[in-house]
Image (cartoon, rainbow, N blue to C red):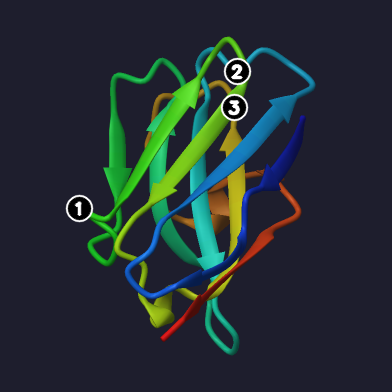
Amino acid sequence: VQLQASGGGLVQAGGSLRLSCGASGRTFNGATMAWFRRALGKEREFLAAIIWSGYSSAYADSVKGRFTISRDSAKNTVYLEMNSLKPEDTAVYYCAAKTSTTVLGRSATWYPYWGQGTLVTVSS
């Protein structure tokens, strides 16, 4: 399984970005995809997860109502739409995957597959 994250960049506070995570290497039916982030000097933080079928998703309280996770099964891509961005959202953002599951995992150690990370910088 290979994951390729993209879409990071510099944005002003209050702005929006959409991150993409392209997945390849196997079928993702019956998989959970997630987004995490790691800010400088902090632990990796769970943001959102989605069952590949799309029928269920979960969010961290810190981003609920501002971030939306979605997937396009035809493109094997998961997205993270980020709105109302704040300077404290500045971090490297990672996508992660676990196959053969329908659990919305929130722990980084639960996911065996990771993308390379994409940097999001929110200026004040």
| Circle nearer the N terminus (3, 2) | 2
Q: Mark 1 belongs to which amino acid?
A: Gly
Q: What residue do we see at 53% from left, 24% from top? A: 31
Left or right: 13 as drawn, with respect to 96: left
Of badges 3 and 2, the one in the foreground is 3
At x 58%, y 89%, the residue is 41
> Where does the C terminus fall, quadrant-wise?
bottom left
Residue count near mark 2 (Cα–Cα under 10 Å), binned few <14, some 14–19, many ≥20: many
Which residue is depicted at the point 62% across and 17% down? Answer: 75
Name the side, left or right, on which 57 lies relative to 91. Answer: left
Picture disc at residue 28: 2
Residue tagged 3: 77
Label 1: which residue? 65
Could you tell which of marks 1 and 2 lies nearer the N-terminus? 2
- From the viewer's perspective, is residue 9 above or below residue 70? below
Secondary structure state at the residue bearing disc 2:
loop
Residue 85 falls in image quadrant: bottom left
Which marked residue is nearer to the observer: mark 1 or mark 2? 1
